[in-house]
Image (cartoon, rainbow, N blue to C red):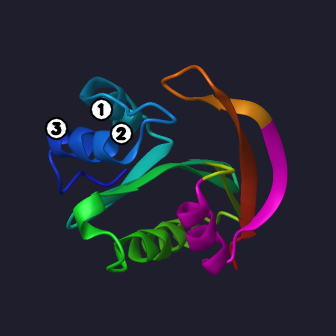
Amino acid sequence: MTPPDLPLAELARIHAACFTTPRPWSEAELAQLIGDSACFLVTSAQGFLLGRTVLDEAEILTIAVDPSARRQGQARALLHDFEGICRAKSVENAFLEVATDNTAARALYRAAGFEVRGRRPRYYRTPEGILKDAEIMGKVIA
């Protein structure tokens, strides 16, 4: 775990600005995850990535960049730092789930070398109760 450079309230604000599906995480939920010894936090000026490692696998739990700071390379830098941490922890494979209709995130992950490995039907629930599929994406960490 890396101590957050951004206060928990700011992490929660950024997450809420980025997500309605899945629902945004509260300060308490973020604090619980950050406090988990398997989890680690990577921050940028206006964004963060929360990851988790178990043995030789890692998962991106969430990545969020304030909408006002998008398209400036912060998400790409967060992914780069995530991979560096994974290498240091001897992680061999990284995974994530992303909504199938989140084209920007899917393009970001593909550009970073992630490939579709599977699908989770009806995985996410919108605030209106609509169920959306998720893609499982993965990458070998070399």
Tag 1 secondary structure: helix
Query: Is residue 35 shown in magenta?
Result: no
Answer few, some or many: residues within 10 Å of disc 3's Cα (few below 14, many 20 plus, some between 14 and 19). Answer: some
Q: Position of residue 126 (x, y in %)?
A: 54, 29
| Residue at (36% x, 39% y) in the render | 34
Q: Find residue 9 and name its label.
A: 3
Please provide the residue range marked out in magenta: 102-120
C-alpha separation, residue under disc 1 versus residue under disc 3 = 10 Å
Query: Is residue 111 shown in magenta?
Result: yes
Please name the amino acid that badge 1 sits on: Ala
Label 2 belongs to which residue?
34
Q: Is residue 50 visible?
A: no
Q: Position of residue 12 (x, y in %)?
A: 26, 38
* Residue furthest to the top: 129
Task: Report the mark closest to the observer, 2 or 3.
Answer: 3
Residue 11 lies in what quarter of the image?
A: top left
Q: Position of residue 99 (x, y in %)?
A: 64, 47
C-alpha separation, residue under disc 2 versus residue under disc 1 = 5 Å
Q: Nearer the viewer, residue 74 or 22?
A: 22
Please name the amino acid that badge 3 sits on: Ala
Q: Is residue 39 above or below residue 78?
A: above
Label 1 belongs to which residue?
31
Answer with left or right where residue 133 lies relative to residue 109: right
| Residue at (40% x, 76% y) in the render | 77
Q: Nearer the viewer, residue 38 or 5?
A: 5
| Residue at (73% x, 58% y) in the render | 137
